[in-house]
Image: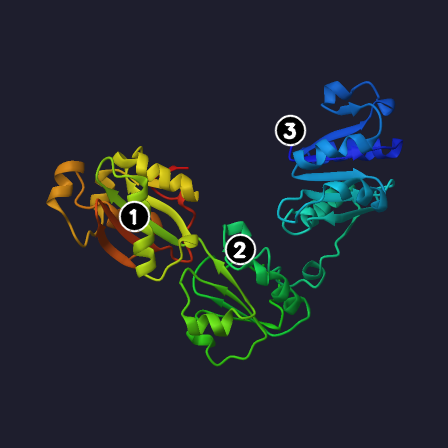
Amino acid sequence: MKPYAVVAITKHGVDIARQIQIGYPLVDVYYPAKLARGDEEALGIQVYQGSVVQQIPRLFPAYQGLIGIVSLGAMVRLIAPWIKDKRTDPAVVVIDDRARHVISVLSGHLGGANQLARDIARVLHATPVITTASDVGETVAVDLLGREFGWVIENENLITAVSAAVVNEERILVIQEAGERDWWPEDKPLPATIQVVDSCDAATDMPFDAALVITPRILTAEETARFLDRGVLYRPKVIVVGIGCNRGTSAEEIDRAIHHVLAEAHLSPLSVRNLATIDLKADEPGIRQVAARYGWPVVTYSAEELNRGPILHPSETVFRYVGAYGVSEPAARLSSGASEWVVEKVKHGNVTVSVCLVPPDRRPASEKSGRVHP
């Protein structure tokens, strides 16, 4: 299966569907058997018997996006019984029978229908029709900010209110303490209603109507009251947790150690990008289980790699067992690309934990040194 399905119901629609298949190979094509031309099997096109109404219940949940070459009203009626939630519904796009307009219908932002409409319109030399206010107004999409970088929104309940403030051109304050800085296109000026500062302290006396706060920090009570009463909190993936442990340490003990250290450092676990350790621990069950529990990749290094850089708290005992004078400290520094530690080294039972923050210009873990274990 491809990510997207194209469904046609007319002769002209079949022509359009076949054109899309040529220009956008991420689609599976479906149309009635009565409109078959004889080459469908060779082209990988699916033909069906009966009405398109019978096809939607299986296609709607099976694909990331559904492209219907039907009227807007017909598509709305076809998908209405199957719509559940914007976080899970697929993108839905419709195209008129002459391929003049490609309309984003459902899941424009989170589902990607707006971009899908633009892509298909480009193939057909048609006009994309986008009605999402932030797209039309060329401003920040609150629910999509940082999504391409893996940022997590902690308080989704405030997305609607803050989005309204953005599209209504109220004063928006962006506080970015960490994370990728290229979330806004370089070739387009940021709307005049949006101001960006690099810390909560810098925003202390600034007037604003709504805020977008990008930080791995646990905010103070005062900061929460000031910035998140009408503000969305984003957790960028900038924390690297270096881990060392005795063989056979349980996942529960490792989990507790990590969360204890992060809490003491006033950092959110939602901003953890990956764990880092020595390659001898790549198959350590406790580490693997914790990583799987939270979707954290594990990046490993050889003892030689770990010994190359500075180790603030070298241990002869650790060296005797694994050949490195430290594990959690150098692993966190190497994986993050940082020059210093937020937490140098904390021993918590059978576990040692070190924490570094990824500098803004560093690449993802998969592009850096070390071996990545998803």
Question: Which residue is rendered at x = 68% and y = 40% of the image?
Answer: 65
Which residue is at the front of the view, 337 or 163? 163
Identified by mark 3, the residue type is: Met
Number of numbered discs visible in the structure rendering: 3
Q: Secondary structure at mark 3?
A: loop
Residue 146 is labelled as: 2
Mark 3 and mark 1 lie on one chain; the one further toward the N terminus is: 3
The vertical placement of 57 against 145, above or below, is: above
**Relative to 265, 213 lies left or right:** right
Q: Nearer the viewer, residue 250 or 202?
A: 250
Residue carrying label 1: 242
Q: Judge by depth and name the residue closer to the eye, 11 or 298.
A: 298
Q: Position of residue 248 (x, y in %)?
A: 24, 35
Q: Secondary structure at mark 1?
A: strand
Task: Report if the CB atoms under discs 3 and 1 are less than 8 Å apart.
Answer: no
Q: Is residue 369 left or right of residue 330?
A: right
What mark, if any, has residue 1 been given in the picture? 3
At x 84% / y 34%, what residue is drawn?
13
| Distance (Cα) linking label 2 and label 1 | 25 Å
Dot 2 falls on a residue whose secondary structure is: loop
